[in-house]
Image: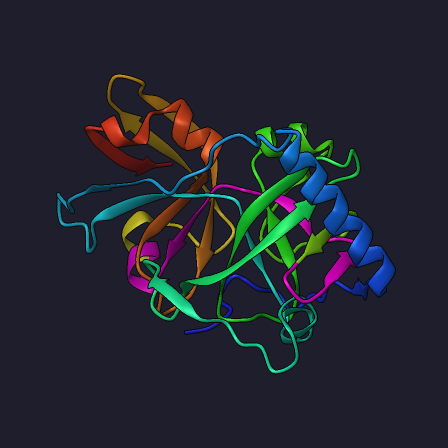
């Protein structure tokens, strides 16, 4: 299954000239030598509540750490002609995977976040997803958006081993959302685009509002929250989770 997050929008990018790439590389190396690269940590976290009360599927909540989606053309610019994504591991949704390919993000304040992973498969737009904490660190005012909605969003420079690009839009904080199939939507009594609440019980229990329903007939029930949200509720310590209206 490919591209169930997308809505057909294409974020344009500009390939940087060799001199510009070399300048960026020098800046990255200089900051690393000075110990100035210290972005906030981001890691994947997950929790599952078994299905109960007749629910068709267990509720899985995953933290979506900072990452990037890429077009085939931008992938070739960053990693060389003919480059393809190499699977590192499968993600929860069938056909989705974390790749071995990593890039470096260069923000407007010349702050840098290295080792940002590209998720596959390739898409028809290039997009960078960060947390608000990442945005503050990088000096970017991140808009809260559903994946693929790039209207009025900021851009960023992306550095790969073979080249660099600057996208003029496509940097977002992803709106928390839940992927649902027809069966899941019928059980919860919702439709695509509706909003639910996510209750997480535990030592740092929280109630997250405005969880957007994202429909695809072949998805598995899964909530995505970002690193800030996962840290706030200490997702690893969650004892129970549920979606409510």
Q: Position of residue 113 (x, y in %)?
A: 61, 41
Residue 119 appears in the rendering: yes
**The N terminus - image quarter:** bottom left
Residue at 31% across / 31% down in the picture?
235
- Say if the magenta span includes residue 176: yes
Specify the segment rendered in magenta: 160-185
Residue 154 appears in the rendering: no
Q: Is residue 43 above or below residue 163?
A: above
Q: Position of residue 60 (x, y in %)?
A: 28, 46
Front residue (pair 226, 148): 226
Going by the image, does 200 lie left or right of 42?
left
Q: Is residue 63 above or below residue 119?
A: above
Q: Is residue 8 above or below residue 135?
A: below
Q: Position of residue 206 (x, y in %)?
A: 36, 22
Q: Find the residue positioned furthest to the top.
A: 203
Front residue (pair 5, 127): 127
Going by the image, does 70 lie left or right of 108?
left
Q: Position of residue 212 (x, y in %)?
A: 49, 45
**The C terminus - image quarter:** top left
């Amino acid at each position: 299954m490919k591209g169930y997050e997308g809505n057909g929008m294409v974020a344009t990018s500009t390939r940087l000239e060799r001199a510009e790439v070399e300048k960026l590389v020098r800046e990255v190396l200089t900051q690393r030598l000075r110990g100035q690269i210290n972005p906030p940590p981001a890691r994947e976290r997950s929790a599952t509540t078994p299905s109960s009360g007749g629910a068709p599927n267990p509720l899985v909540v995953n933290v979506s750490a900072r990452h990037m989606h890429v077009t085939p053309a931008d992938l070739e610019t960053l990693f060389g002609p003919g480059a393809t994504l190499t699977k590192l591991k499968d993600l929860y949704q069938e056909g989705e995977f974390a790749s071995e390919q990593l890039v470096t993000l260069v923000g407007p304040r010349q702050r840098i976040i290295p080792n940002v992973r590209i998720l596959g498969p390739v898409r028809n737009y290039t997009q960078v997803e960060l947390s608000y904490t990442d945005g503050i660190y990088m000096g970017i005012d991140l808009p809260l958006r559903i994946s693929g909605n790039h209207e009025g969003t900021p851009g960023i420079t992306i550095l790969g081993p073979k080249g660099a690009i600057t996208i003029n839009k496509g940097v977002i904080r992803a709106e928390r959302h839940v992927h649902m199939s027809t069966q899941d939507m019928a059980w919860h009594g919702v439709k695509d685009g509706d909003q639910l609440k996510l209750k997480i019980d535990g030592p740092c229990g929280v109630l997250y509002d405005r969880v957007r329903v994202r429909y695809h007939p072949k998805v598995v029930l899964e909530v995505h929250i970002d690193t800030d949200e996962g840290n706030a509720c200490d997702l690893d310590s969650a004892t129970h989770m549920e979606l409510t209206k």
